[in-house]
Amino acid sequence: STVGISLPIYPELKEIYITEPLRYLIEPLVIDPENQIYFSQTLKGEIIGGLEDKREYGFHEFTVSLKNTIKYLRSLKEIVYGIEGIGILRGWSGYYEMTPDSSHIMGFSNHWPEGLYIDAGYSGHGMMFAPFSGKIMAEFLADNVKNKYLDIFSPERFNLHRLINENL
């Protein structure tokens, strides 16, 4: 690290798939812990999602494995009726930035250099949380308004063993 701090943020490779479009069947985001699959349907009718394929943290080659693609399609067909014969249009891989409790780090530490603030490690939740946490960080930096979420998502929670328990 260039400023002498260490953050518990680690890369985890994920694969995402998108199917051919079909009539609108699925309204919410579906998370099935038993089959370790999550997906939703786009406005164009494609089903987009992936598997909870736990790998070792670290950098891996960007690939889309045939094994995982087949597992995703089979699991999808078990859950969504009437999609026999649907094909995968494409798949891609990329990284989540994971923390030990799968929640982002926001704020500062008294042990860090003055003026260093962090808002990172979203563990796949960035599109949901980034606008709100950006507002919180902006209010804190510009107006010194300290929102309660700065304490909840503080980097100090790891040292204090106050991990966030995210239950589904």
Image: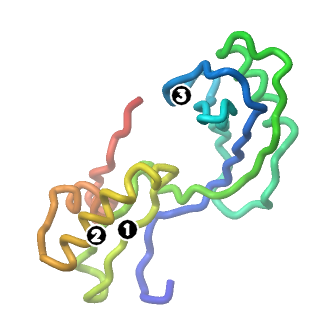
Residue 89 position within the rendered picture, expressed as x and y whole percent measured from the top left: 82, 39
**Residue beneath disc 1:** 119
Q: Please say if the residues under marks 3 and 1 sit with CB atoms less than 8 Å apart.
A: no
How far is the residue under mark 1 from the one under mark 2?
A: 6 Å
How far is the residue under mark 3 from the one under mark 1?
A: 26 Å
- Residue 88 versus residue 85 in the image, above or below: below
Q: Secondary structure at mark 3?
A: strand
- The quadrant the C terminus occupies is top left
Residue 145 position within the rendered picture, expressed as x and y whole percent measured from the top left: 12, 69
Which image quadrant is residue 79 in?
top right
Q: Secondary structure at mark 2?
A: strand
Which image quadrant is residue 86 in?
top right
**Residue beneath disc 2:** 107
Badge 3: residue crowd in 10 Å (few <14, some 14–19, many ≥20): some
In the displayed structure, does residue 144 sit left or right of residue 88? left
Badge 1: residue crowd in 10 Å (few <14, some 14–19, many ≥20): some
Residue 43 position within the rendered picture, expressed as x and y whole percent measured from the top left: 59, 35
Q: Please say if the residues under marks 1 and 2 sit with CB atoms less than 8 Å apart.
A: yes
Q: Secondary structure at mark 1?
A: strand
Which image quadrant is residue 85 in?
top right
Amino acid marked by disc 2 = Gly
